[in-house]
Image (tube, helix red, strand yellow):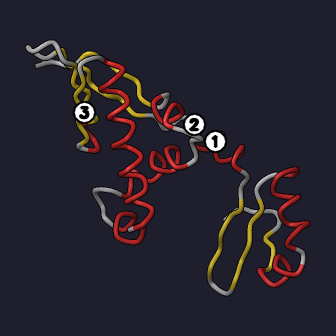
Amino acid sequence: MIVQSTHNATDVRKNWGQFNDDVVRKGPQFVQRNRDEWAALSKEQLHAAFNSFYFNANLFHEDDGSITLSIRDLGIIANGETEEEALAELAEFLIDYAEEYQEEFELYYRSPNRRDHFPFIMNVLIQDDIEGVKSLVKCQHGEK
């Protein structure tokens, strides 16, 4: 890893307040504890790191007049009477999936078919509310 300065975990623990201030004001900080290495980032830095990970949803106009949104890569489908209703339902499904991914992180992150979901999940988890999650969905007209 190309890092100018990696902090020892013991020093971080001793200077926790300063460490947090440095993360927020100076940028991400890297820590090593035995064999484990990790990074600390502020929420603002997380947003910058993951803001390009959004969801492409296919939009379908159903015969009954309803709207279906589908994120094929995640296998998530939502339907509503309007696009806004379908988007709200889709956002709820994304939040549920992100929470499940976080709760079962070791399983999902180690699964070859779900590992690539990680940056998208992080982008969901750092949103302040459902409106933030809805803003991550880019709709495009799908084919029947």
Name which quarter of the figure residue 94 lies in: top left
Provide the secondary structure element on which disc 2 rests.
Answer: loop
Q: CA distance from mark 2 to mark 3?
A: 23 Å
Provide the secondary structure element on which disc 1 rests.
Answer: helix
Q: How many marks?
A: 3
Please indicate whether residue 42 sits to the left or right of residue 66 in the image: right
Q: Which mark is residue 78?
A: 3
Counting residues from the start of the chain, the first of labels 2 and 3 encountered is 2
Counting residues from the start of the chain, the first of labels 1 and 3 encountered is 1
Whether label 1 touches label 3, CB < 8 Å: no
Q: CA distance from mark 1 to mark 3?
A: 26 Å
Whether label 1 touches label 2, CB < 8 Å: yes
Q: Residue at x 26, y 27 (%)?
A: 69
Q: Which mark is residue 51?
A: 2
Viewer-side residue, 103 vs 75: 103
Please indicate whether residue 121 sits to the left or right of residue 45 in the image: left
Quarter of the image where the N terminus is located: bottom right
Q: Position of residue 125 (x, y in %)?
A: 52, 49
Q: Position of residue 2 (x, y in %)?
A: 71, 62
Q: Residue at x 77, y 80 (%)?
A: 9
Q: Residue at x 26, y 15 (%)?
A: 141
Quarter of the image where the C terminus is located: top left
Q: Position of residue 6 (x, y in %)?
A: 78, 70
Viewer-side residue, 67 vs 52: 67
Question: Which residue has dot 1 on it?
Answer: 47
Q: Residue at x 47, y 32 (%)?
A: 136
Provide the secondary structure element on which disc 3 rests.
Answer: strand
Identify whether 128 is placed above or below 112.
above
